[in-house]
Image (cartoon, rainbow, N blue to C red):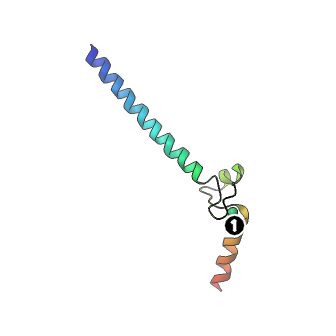
Amino acid sequence: MDAVDHAQRLAEQDLQRALDTNKAKFVGQDVDFMHCLECGVEIPKARREAIHCCKYCVDCQELIEHKAKHYRK
Ligand SMILES: [Zn+2]
C-alpha cells in the first residue's frame, strides 16, 4: 500500500508544482507592468486594471502617442 501512497503523493506534488509555476508566471507578468517602461514610475493599480498589459504611465503614453502622430506627418 506504500507504493500507492507514494504515487499519490508524487501526483499531488506534480499538481502543486504546476500551480506554483502558473502563479509565478502570473506574478512575474504583473510585476513587469508595475512600473512604466519609459520612466520607471509606478503605474497606478486602477490604470493597470483598466488597460490590459499597460506598459507606460499616463504621461509617457501621451508622449509616445504625440510623437507617433508627429512622425506620421
Ligand atoms: Zn512614464
x then y, percent, for residue 11: 35, 28
Give the residue drawn at x 62%, y 60%.
55
Question: Label 1 belongs to which residue?
Answer: 60
Where is residue 51, by image quadrant? Answer: bottom right
Q: Quadrant of the C terminus?
A: bottom right
Circle 1 residues within 10 Å: few <14, some 14–19, many ≥20 = some
Q: Secondary structure at mark 1?
A: helix
Query: How many dots with numbers?
Result: 1
In the rendered image of this protein, does residue 41 appear above or below residue 62? above
Q: Amino acid at mark 1?
A: Cys
Give the residue drawn at x 70%, y 71%.
63
The answer to whether the residue bearing label 1 lies less than 8 angstroms from the nearest atom of ligand 1 is: yes
x then y, percent, for residue 15: 40, 32
x then y, percent, for residue 47: 70, 54
**Which quadrant of the picture is home to ligand 1?**
bottom right
Give the residue drawn at x 34%, y 27%.
10
Question: Seen in the image, is 18 located left or right of residue 70?
Answer: left
Give the residue drawn at x 68%, y 66%.
61
x then y, percent, for residue 57: 69, 60
Q: Farthest front residue?
A: 40
Where is residue 1, by image quadrant? Answer: top left
Q: Farthest top residue?
A: 1
Question: Seen in the image, is 50 located left or right of residue 22?
Answer: right
Q: Farthest bottom residue?
A: 73
Question: Seen in the image, is 2 located left or right of residue 54?
Answer: left
In the rendered image of this protein, does residue 46 appear above or below residue 9? below
